[in-house]
Image: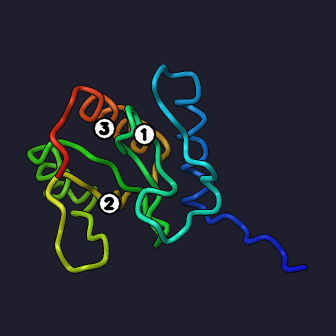
C-alpha cells in the first residue's frame, strides 16, 4: 500500500484556518484540506457554496477580497494576484506570500466578510 502524502507546512497552516471557522454558521470546510486535489476549489472554505479561502493545487494560500484590497496587499508585498494556471491573473484573488498564522486568519476573515456579503464572482 502506498504511504499517505505528508501535508506541507502551508496545508498544516490552512488546517488551522479551517478549524477556526468550524463553528461559523454557513461555512463549509473542504472535504480534506490536507490532501488538495488538482480541481479548482477542492481544498476550499466556502460560504453559501462560494469559495472565500483555499489552498491551491500548488500549495498556496489564496483568498478572495475586493480588488482594491488585493491591490493594497500586492503593493505592500504581502502577496500577488492569483493565477489559476492559464496565465490570466484574477483581480479579486490574492495568493498570500507571508507565512503568518495571524495574517492568514485575518485575511480569511476579510474574505469571508467579502464573499458572504454577496460579492460578485470574478
Sequence-first tag of 2 and 1:
1
> In this rendering, which labeled residue sits more in front, label 3 or label 1?
1
What residue occupies the far right of the structure in this picture?
A: 1
> Which secondary structure, mark 2?
strand
- The residue drawn where x is 47% and y is 58% is 55
Observer-side mark, 2 or 1, equals: 1
Left or right of residue 44, residue 7 in this image:
right
**Disc number for residue 46:** 1
| Residue 41, placed above or below residue 8 | above
Q: Secondary structure at mark 1?
A: strand
The disc label shown at residue 111, or none: 3
Which mark, by number, is residue 16? none
Rendered position, 28 above or below 9: above
Q: Quadrant of the N terminus?
A: bottom right
Does 120 sit above or below residue 80?
A: above
Q: Residues within 10 Å of mark 1 (few under 14, many from 20)?
A: many
User: Helix or strand or loop: what does disc 3 sit on?
Assistant: helix
Q: Residues within 10 Å of mark 3 (few under 14, many from 20)?
A: many
Drawn side of residue 66 relative to residue 43, left or right:
left
Q: Earlier in the sequence, mark 3 or mark 2?
A: 2
Q: Quadrant location of residue 76?
A: bottom left
Classify residue 91 as left or right of residue 28.
left
Q: Residue at x 23, y 26 (%)?
A: 117
On the image, the x and y values in percent for residue 66 come to 15, 42
Residue at image location 26% in from the left, 70% down from the top: 83
Residues at discs 2 and 1 in contact (Cβ within 8 Å): no
Number of the label disc, if any, that sits on residue 95: 2
Distance from the alpha carbon under mark 3 to that under mark 2: 12 Å
- Which residue is located at x 60 percent, y 61 percent? 9
Q: Give the CA separation, mark 3 to mark 1.
A: 10 Å
Amino acid at each position: 500500500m502506498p504511504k499517505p502524502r505528508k501535508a506541507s507546512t502551508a496545508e498544516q497552516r490552512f488546517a488551522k484556518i479551517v478549524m477556526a471557522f468550524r463553528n461559523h454558521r454557513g461555512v463549509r470546510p473542504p472535504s480534506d484540506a490536507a490532501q488538495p486535489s488538482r480541481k479548482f476549489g477542492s481544498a476550499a472554505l466556502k460560504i453559501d457554496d462560494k469559495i472565500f479561502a483555499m489552498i491551491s493545487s500548488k500549495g498556496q494560500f489564496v483568498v478572495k477580497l475586493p480588488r482594491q484590497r488585493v491591490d493594497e496587499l500586492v503593493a505592500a508585498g504581502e502577496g500577488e494576484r492569483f493565477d489559476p494556471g492559464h496565465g490570466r491573473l484574477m483581480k479579486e484573488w490574492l495568493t498570500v506570500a507571508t507565512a503568518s498564522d495571524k495574517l492568514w486568519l485575518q485575511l480569511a476573515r476579510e474574505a469571508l466578510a467579502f464573499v458572504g456579503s454577496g460579492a460578485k464572482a470574478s
